[in-house]
Amino acid sequence: RGGRKRNGGGGGGGGGGGEHRGMEQTERTSDSQKEHSDVCSATFYVPDLRSEDVVIKLNKLLSCLQSSSFPVRLPPSSTDSSLSSFSSSFHPPLKVTGYDINRHTRTVTISSSSSLDKSLLLKTLEEHLASPVCLLGSTCPEERRRFQVEGITCGACVRRIEQGLKRSPAVRDVTVSLASSICTVKLEAGVDSCYVLEMLEALGYRGKEISSSQRECPRLVRRREAEHWRLLFLRSAALTFPAYLIAMPLDHLPSLHLLFHTSLWRAFTVQHLLLLLLCAPVQFGIGRCFYIASYKALRTGAANMDVLVALGTSAAFLYSLCSIVIACIDLNMVPHHFFETSAMLITFVLLGRRFEASAKGEASDAVSALMRLHPAHACILVPADEHKKEGEEEGAGGAGGAGREMEEKGHGKKELYDEERKLRVKVIGISELEVGDVVVVHEGERVPCDGVALQLTLSYVDESMVTGESKAKRKEEGDLLIGGSLVVRGNVEMRAARVGADSLLNQMVKLVEDAQATKAPMQLLADKIAARFVPFIVFLSLLTFSLWYTSCCAHLVPVDWTSIGGRPEPFMFAFLFANAVLVAACPCALGLATPTAVMVGTGVSARLGILIKSGAALEELRGVNVVVLDKTGTMTEGGMRVTGVNAYPTAQLDEDDNWVLQLAAQVEKASRSHHPIANAICLFAASARKIDFPDITRVEEKEGYGVQCFLGHRSVKIGSRTWMSQLGLLGGQQLEREKESEKGGCTTVCVSVEERLVGTITLADPIRKDAAYLVDSLQRMGVQVMIVSGDNKETCDYIGRQVGVQEEQIFSNVLPRDKSNVIVGLQDKGLRVAMVGDGINDSVALAQANVGIALGRGADVALEAADVVLVRNELNAILTAMDLSRCIVRRIQLNYCWAMGYNLVVLPLAAGALYPSLRVSLPPALAGLCMALSSVSVVLSSLMLRLYTPPQLSKSSSSSSSSRASSLCPNWRKSVRSFVQQCTNLMRGFKRRTGKSHLLDKLPRLSKYRKAHGSRRPLSAMAPCARRYENIPQGDVDFDEFV
């Protein structure tokens, strides 16, 4: 598995045999070297290290490096025979004291007693091995890869994969999701994906890398998995059901009883033969997947749920077989068989796996729904004189008709799209779309990418699936179009701005997948339990057998309890209880409690336009008790508008209002500032008479204050009233006048030339209509609300009075670098803080807070630093995010209670705890069925989160804890009806019918329609009401969803 590790100078005389022995074993580092505190080491990843030639060459190189006469640099043409022929005059030498070659992880660790020049050593290895070498370390960049893993069944599998991959020095972090079976690995830069796939193969799992360009729909993956388990279940049931009939009901018929008990050889009867022929293929054919998974798990020193299934079914089958063999040898023995029990166990487990895969597919429906918004093709405009063959060559490789000329349906035009502009339409694959292409989107089609509208008729676009906005928006020329949105009316021409992975829809998919792949802190408890669950269950099963068998032998148990066929059978009596314990235990329910709830919850939040980046942020958001709001762009509209310009002419200059305005605008343009105040001044100045100031030089931005520059030889300062007051340029009557205007919520920008105030510009930012409702709703939830802003105290106090925030909870005149200090001060008091902002100056505070919430229209830096991104620019989403996080955490806790409660109730029942008092026991077959359905119940519990309804901002609403005891159940009848419908869909395999409706689907809808309207018209009569939504099929309208 590894190379030979050499210490000191013992490697110089090693020959070929030494190297060969070094490849077979790895020596431990000497105790003297371990105790040496000054040893430096470096680890390198060599992709070709599994080759024998590379290992031999590397052993020779490192052996020579241990000698003090070996130089640092090697010529590229150096050979093995010339390694030791170089003079020691090359300085400084590489003082290597030891090395360790690990062929399994393809790494080599080199140690030195002094400082080690890693860059020179890396170059030396690359030149000599003629192979790429990667230096592993904390300073190296990392690459994030995602893999779809087959064979993950429980939390023990998750822990085994994570621990197995983390042993490699090339792997920095590993996260495995039980709900989605996706493994997210952070690798050192330069390490290929085949390395991870080989490690997964060594652990007993098959993996497939998920690339960003060829991302597969999670629901399709689960559907294939569910189909696989369905086929196995049908094959097993086809053999198990006849075996059950032969063993139980048919055996009680007198005529068949005589036939079944006809002896073929001694105690071996016809019934035994039939059961063997039916159950052996189930046990060792269909059930071989459990044996293979158990072997792979035990080979790596771990145990999972497959081990319990294999032990329980094998024990029942082998006990029955041994009982028949012993009875054939000893005629005084009566054979007892449980062949049908082992077959029923396997059948029930397969049924549970099939239901579990289907339920997981429903849990991942959010990502699947987002991915389905991607159209397969895009229609772009190209010059009409472009040759058709040339167009086909350019579009080669596109899906389904790339490079073909398209006939405009319903428009009566062929080839030419616009005769005046001489343009025609070409259909290309969505992957071939490039930035700058002009795309045509017709009514009823989805927008293929993000872009800007160029020409359009009266158009309305439905963005509900992307942003959660319920109403269709009217689009005009210059408006932004979001990829995946639906054009419900009109035709649109747009220029592609962001395509592929850069589009908003792809970024949303990536954020949701990342959130579902991360682990919430509550998952750590399940991981610890899963690591010890299977060994504990095996121990409990052996303890149950020992106690019952010992009690029977000691005559502590009545004889009639153990009598079977008139003879006491203490061994079989104890064996049944022990076998029931093995098959009843279910670690899957614990492992699925958190990831399924997080998966469904993040999907619901994405549907509402809220992107939660991780499970940890979800749990932190639930415990937030202080919300800090930025003023500009959060509490206000963020669109500053100039309300007044006042000029103060001096003796040296003859300024007027327009002169002051144009000077401020051109200075702000020269500073290239993106501050809302600067944008508002520039926008307002564009509509006034322009005055050129060509001699503006040495522009410098003063953070938190304003801008200073030089106009020729005169100094110019443009900034806040506070800055001018500190400079002594504002005082007396002017100061009082500006303070009065700021008390009304206005912001004053002062303009000074040569240390003299020449004018002021007054701006106002309207308060959001829902800001006061948000503050009131948060306060009713028991959350403190604070405002932090760099604006002056008068303006901030005015905003606070309008929205209901007390004066002592307002922080004004706060510089951008000091906003994080405000957050730290609150956290030092033991408060859990959520920061809401949208600007670059909020990014540090967003990262410092326990939970950072960024508005979707904010700066890219703020979106990157935040933990929660609100796609819709609405304050209601803040309340929804906090309320949804509380519902998700409550659902996780309920899942844990169900999973723990199931095991705490079923395991004592299976062990026979109630048998002495009530004579109640759990047969092994029924125990297997309970185990199979327990994990399904946890997934269905998580699916209840899809019934979540967001709270509404309202002043008149009562306390959140009293008015909305649970957001999941606004109407208990609706919740029960939806739960029953989901269970029905689960039993039907989640296959949506597009043709004739099933009778069970049709009757409740029609009866409800007739009861409400007193009509016997079919449901299709409601379809004309939805004519404006052309994408709704006329024959497949769900009445409940339509209402």
Image (tube, grey):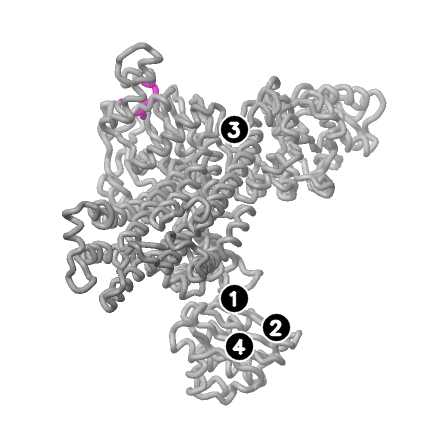
Does residue 36 show up? Answer: yes
Give the secondary structure at mark 3.
loop
Q: Is residue 932 above or below residue 811?
A: below
Q: Is disc 1 surrounded by few (<14), some (14 to 19) or many (20+) residues within 10 Å?
A: many
Q: Is residue 549 above or below residue 653?
A: below
Name the mark nearer the viewer: 3 or 4: 3
Name the mark nearer the viewer: 1 or 3: 3
Mark positioned earlier in the residue sequence (3 or 2): 2
For label 3, the residue is: 967
- Residues under labels 1 and 2: Cα distance? 14 Å
Q: Which residues are magenta?
A: 1026-1034
Residue 620 location, x and y as percent?
59, 41
Q: How many marks?
A: 4
Give yes or no for residue 1030 being in the magenta stretch.
Answer: yes
For label 2, the residue is: 40
Q: Nearer the viewer, residue 135 or 920?
A: 920
Q: Nearer the viewer, residue 551 or 435?
A: 551
Q: Residue at x 72, y 25 (%)?
A: 795
Q: Is residue 455 above or below residue 321?
A: above
Instruction: Give the residue type at disc 3.
Output: Ser
Q: Residue at x 56, y 70 (%)?
A: 42
Give yes or no for residue 581 being in the magenta stretch.
Answer: no
Name the mark nearer the viewer: 1 or 4: 4
For label 4, the residue is: 99
